[in-house]
Amino acid sequence: LLPEAFIQKHLIVPVSLNKELRRLEVLMAHPDELRVMDEVSLITGYRVVPRVSPHSELLRLIDKFYVHRTSSSDALSKLQEDINKDDS
């Protein structure tokens, strides 16, 4: 959904997509960065719902799912599994 360069530059990680509601949930360190959320919405066409995440966690997720990624859909699925596992 988002270009890898954009994800790395802004430390933003998509975690959930609801096509029916046209909603994209993202992890970011600073959800008050409205310009970044507006850009995400413009790029994806989805309404952005931010979730706060520590900077170190974002770096770990980006390294795990984007630097060594396979496909974006696989990365999103694995990321969601990882987040769900961490919430348990």
Image (spheres, helix red, strand yellow):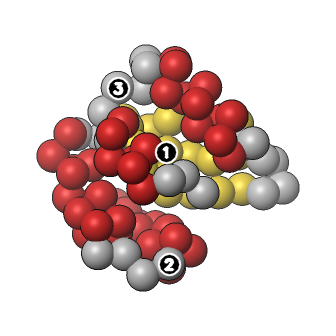
- What kind of element bears circle 3? loop
| Residue denoted by label 3 | 30
Q: Nearer the viewer, mark 2 or mark 1?
A: 2
Q: Residues within 10 Å of mark 2 (few under 14, many from 20)?
A: few
Q: Earlier in the sequence, mark 3 or mark 2?
A: 3
Answer yes or no: is residue 14 visible. Answer: yes
Q: Quadrant of residue 16?
A: bottom right
Image side of residue 73 versus residue 67, left or right: right
Q: Quadrant of the C terminus?
A: bottom left
Whether tag 1 and tag 3 are in contact, CB under 8 A, the answer is no
Residue occupying image coordinates x 49% and y 45%: 26
Whether tag 2 and tag 1 are in contact, CB under 8 A, the answer is no
Residue occupying image coordinates x 56% and y 74%: 73
Q: Quadrant of residue 9?
A: top left
Mark identifier at residue 26: 1
Real-space Cα distance between discs 3 and 2? Answer: 26 Å
Where does residue 72 sit, x and y in percent of width and height? 52, 71
- What kind of element bears circle 2? loop
- Three-letter residue code for mark 1: Val
Image side of residue 74 versus residue 82, left or right: right
| Residue denoted by label 2 | 71
Q: Residues within 10 Å of mark 3 (few under 14, many from 20)?
A: some
Q: Nearer the viewer, mark 3 or mark 2?
A: 2
Where does residue 69 sit, x and y in percent of width and height? 37, 75
Residue occupying image coordinates x 78% and y 57%: 19
Image side of residue 57 versus residue 75, left or right: left
